[in-house]
Amino acid sequence: SICHNITSANTAMLVEESIETSLETSSSFNKSDKPEKMLSTSSAATPEAKSAKSLKRQGSRQMMRLNSFIRAHDLDVPASSKSALLAVDGTASSGTIMTALVAIGLSEAADESSRWTATSATDKILNKRAKAIKRGESIKNGPMGSWPNAAAGNDVLVWSSKCTRPGHGNDYPVVKSRGLVPASAKEVVELLSDSSKVKTYNKYSAGRDDQYYITQNTPSCEEKCPDVGVSGEAKIMSSLSQPPLTRKPLEFKTLFYARQLDKEDNVQMDGVAFITVGRSVWETSEGTSDGAEEITTRCDLLLSVNLIREVVVDNGESWCELTTVTHAVSPGIPIFVGKQLGLTAAENYVKDIRKLFEK
């Protein structure tokens, strides 16, 4: 199977504790060679050992179903689910959640409407472009996408907007940034998907772990996972960061999904393009944690987007444009202060990723 549900080593004890629960569960699960090899202690396993391994696989998926819930108030899901948190359980309903998150992510990242307020530096850049176009001059002098407000040169464009989606967290602003990266879109999405490399572009990161794989595909794999019904890579991640002005480390537990875009996604592209989307998950259906993070502050990430579009150039070099969108509830930080921090962080995020690929 191309769809595996496995756990990282730091959740092994929880898997063992969930086996008793899985004994009472009559649901059947797809078998997978990869988890069998991870759980196997012998190449010639006895029937009893095979049964134990099957229970472990069921236990890990059962644990994920019971302990990963996501807000659905603004998602395109059945109306009866909008007021509740939905389980991310590795079934077709999880695929519906991820598809809905991609739709929101593309809508925000590719939206060039007047709802977005540019920073003063971005406003100067865009006004200078508008005057050049009015004079009949070309604004393209190097790699640049064909879509409105495309990034050029070393500029990083940054905007903020009120949240237009109803419900939880819509009083917190949405921040967007955009800039060029001297790499292919595939290289950038692979970097963003690799939890072991997050510290190379996020100086405030204290580490990120992949806790569960919902699909074990790569973002560029177009084959759909039979259980979930979507292509690409999906997983539950746990991360810590320590940005300025925070007394305790910030903790995130997030559904991360990455896939390649196609013409049916209705977003302007010049070549290969990818999207990653993320949203916080919780241990209970009420949107609360398990209370274990006494020395951290648990954060509510409502939307994280990376839209990565290749830019066509004539000299054979690889370039892409990275557009990021972030919408988060920042506990203990005034909204105005959080907005200013978010604008700065969004700009630095693009610059730091660019530095990794500069030669």
Image: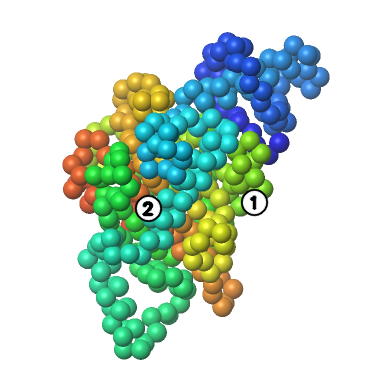
- x and y percent of residue 192 in the render? 49, 49
Residue 358 on image: x %, y %: 47, 63
**Foreground of the two, 79 or 72:** 79
Q: Which residue is drawn at 28% across and 60% down?
A: 115
* 169 relative to 14, above or below: below
Write the residue at 27% across / 56% down.
Answer: 160
Given residues 325 and 284, the one toward you in this image is 284
Q: Is residue 359 visible from the viewing direction of this image?
A: no
The answer to whether residue 236 of the structure is visible from this angle is yes
**Mark 2 surroundings: few (<14), some (14-19) or many (≥20) residues within 10 A:** many
Q: Nearer the viewer, residue 139 or 355?
A: 139
Left/right placement of residue 31 relative to residue 88 reads right
- Relative to 15, does residue 90 appear above or below in the rendering? below
Q: What residue type is labelled 1?
A: Glu
On the image, the x and y values in percent for residue 340 come to 22, 51
| Type of amino acid under label 2 | Val
- Residue 325's disc is 2
Q: Quadrant of the N terminus?
A: top right
Q: Which residue lies furthest to the front in this view?
A: 79
Residue at 44 percent of width and 60 percent of height: 322
Q: Which mark is residue 222?
A: 1
